[in-house]
Structures are given as structure tokens and as C-alpha cells.
Amino acid sequence: MAFTNLVQIYRCLCDMTRLRILHLLKQGPLCVCHFQDVLQLPQVAVSKHLAYLRRTGMVEARRHEQWMIYSLPASPGRELDLQLRCLQDCVQTEPVFRGDSRRLKALGPKCNWIPQAVEPSRAAKQAGSRKCHSAQCTA
Amino acid sequence: MAFTNLVQIYRCLCDMTRLRILHLLKQGPLCVCHFQDVLQLPQVAVSKHLAYLRRTGMVEARRHEQWMIYSLPASPGRELDLQLRCLQDCVQTEPVFRGDSRRLKALGPKCNWIPQAVEPSRAAKQAGSRKCHSAQCTA
DNA sequence: GCCGTATATTCTCATGGAGGTATATGCGCG
DNA sequence: CGCGCATATACCTCCATGAGAATATACGGC
């Protein structure tokens, strides 16, 4: 009954915050505090929307030390894949989403758990790079 | 602010009945009583969903004698167009939708207001073809 | 074990929307 | 004009879910 899935996918997509989250995830995995920074929304909002997306299989999550890293499913279903592509097309030129992308880029290189470095080097750890370096994270 | 639109489009799409309606409309204009037949839902349900879709610009309606004929917008926005295509792709193989298509075909030729004949011939009118000939319509 | 940071869960309140029944409107006919 | 059919709207009830505040849990460092 994949068609039930389809409605569920659409339910996920009919909220602007979730659209923005998915759009960001298209560009790579992210942790919650980065979503906070980029979306400029309170933690609870982000967290709840992520939980929603997770419940319905739209995103996956794994823990890395203190951070939860969210990403698009490694093997999304056919429908989800189509929908995410379509979303991307629809969103390409929208100011809000472009703004998000911009803020995301501003953060990107500061993260020590970004894909290439999910397992931070021992050196990095000792250097204190355990922190979440995103702007708002005063950790 | 086309992005508001996008969320609205998704809101329309997150209901199975509306998905089925849109899928049917992809195959051509339809009147309410045919939706009833094909979807096998009560009139009020169909009518309300159509009203919803109409309010948000997802479908257009025109009156033809006693019937309201609904169709996809002549010039849908870019987003809507993309979404409808995507929907089509997602839905292609789903039993529910295939069932709808089948029932639709069974009705099709009987309608005197179908696109080719929106203005029924005088002869047809006199022959009593004013009626809505769909299965359930005991008119 | 305690603390701080990161994230999740719980609760309350408010809203939207789906389904159903009853009723209203619009149209053509006689 | 009154009737019947096609369709729309109003009203009600129920449920999902969004926002926000407060609280709970998880993890690493000391």
C-alpha cells in the first residue's frame, strides 16, 4: 500500500518548516542546532518537526556524541525520491530557501561532524573541536 | 510569494480523495456526479473537496446547464504543473488510481458534456441527452 | 556523581480540516 | 411558477497537528 505512503509524504510536505528542513537536507546531513541557526527557529520547533519527519520515514537520524545528525534516507522509496526531486525544482528560486542555503553555507565548514568527518580525528577531539561550532552554539 | 502557494499545493495533495480527483482531472474535465460514480463517495464529500481545490486554484470550474464541470487550470503555475506531473508519476501503478481510471473509462463516452461536446447539439438535446448518463445518475 | 550542552518529550491551547446530516441554490422543463 | 435534478453551503462533531513553555533524557568532561 504505497499509496498510503504518498499521502503521508504530502502531509510532511505541507508545512513550510519541514519543506525548509528537507531542502537543507538535500545539501547534506545536519544536526539540530544547525537547523536552529539556519532556520532561525526555537529548538523545540525544529526538534518536533524532525521527529515528525523521522516518524514517517522522510529522514533518518543517527547520534554522534551529543549531536543528532539528520539526513535523507540512504534508500528512499521511489515516491519519496520523486517528490524530493520535484520539491527541489519547485523551490530553486524561492527567496526563503535561497536564504537558508546561504546561511547553511556560512556554517558548513565549521562543523566537525560533517559527512567527511563523522568520526572526528583524535587530534581534533583533543583540540576541543568536540564543540558544535555553529554561530549560535556557545558550547 | 509563490512559496506560500507551494505549501498550499501540498495541503491540497495530502488527502487521498483530492489526489484521486486530481488524477482523474488529468484525464479530462469531469462533472460532480461522475466523480461520485468513479470515486464512489457521497455527493457532499466530493463537492467539498472540489470546493477546497477550487479555493486554492488547483482546479477550475464552469457551469454547463445543470452541471458544474471541473478541470485543471488552463494555465497552472510552474509549481502546480511540476507537482501534477510528479503526482502522475507517483500514482501510475497504484491500484486505487488504476481502478478510478477504469471506472472513468466505463463512463466516459456516455457524457454529453465531455470536452468535444460541451455544447451539445440541438438534436442531442431534443433526444433527451440533457441527462447526465453516468451509472448512478438516475436523472 | 555532578554539570553543562544538545536534543526529546509532555502538556496546554488553538486551529484546520474531514465526515455526516440537513438545507439552500441554480438550472431546465412543463 | 412549481418540480426535480445537480450541486453547494451551513452546522456539528471528531481528530490531527502546530506553537510555545516547562521538563526530561542523553552524552561528554571533570
Image (spheres, coloured by chain):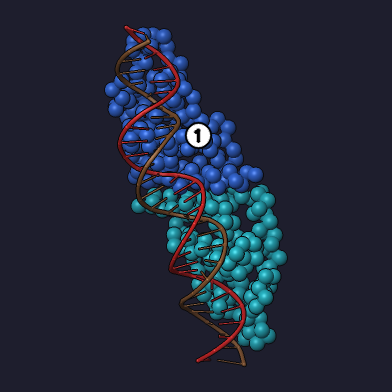
Chain colours: A blue, B cyan, C brown, D red
Image point (55%, 30%), residue name: A74
Residue A18 vertical position relative to residue B118 in the rendered view, above or below = above
Image point (44%, 59%), residue name: B56
Residue D8 in picture, x, y percent from top left:
48, 70
Q: How many marks?
A: 1
Residue A114 in picture, x, y percent from top left:
42, 23
Front residue of A56/B111: it is A56
Front residue of A118/D24: it is D24
Residue D30 vertical position relative to residue C26 in the rendered view, above or below = above
Chain of the residue that carries numbered disc 1 in the rendered image = A
Image point (52%, 61%), residue name: B49
Front residue of A15/A133: it is A15
* Few, some or many residues within 10 Å of mark 1 (<14, 14–19, 20+): some
Amino acid at the residue labelled 1: Arg
On the question of residue A49 being in view, the answer is yes
Determine the secondary structure under disc 1. helix
The C terminus of chain A sits in image quarter: top left
Residue B120 vertical position relative to residue A27 in the rendered view, above or below = below
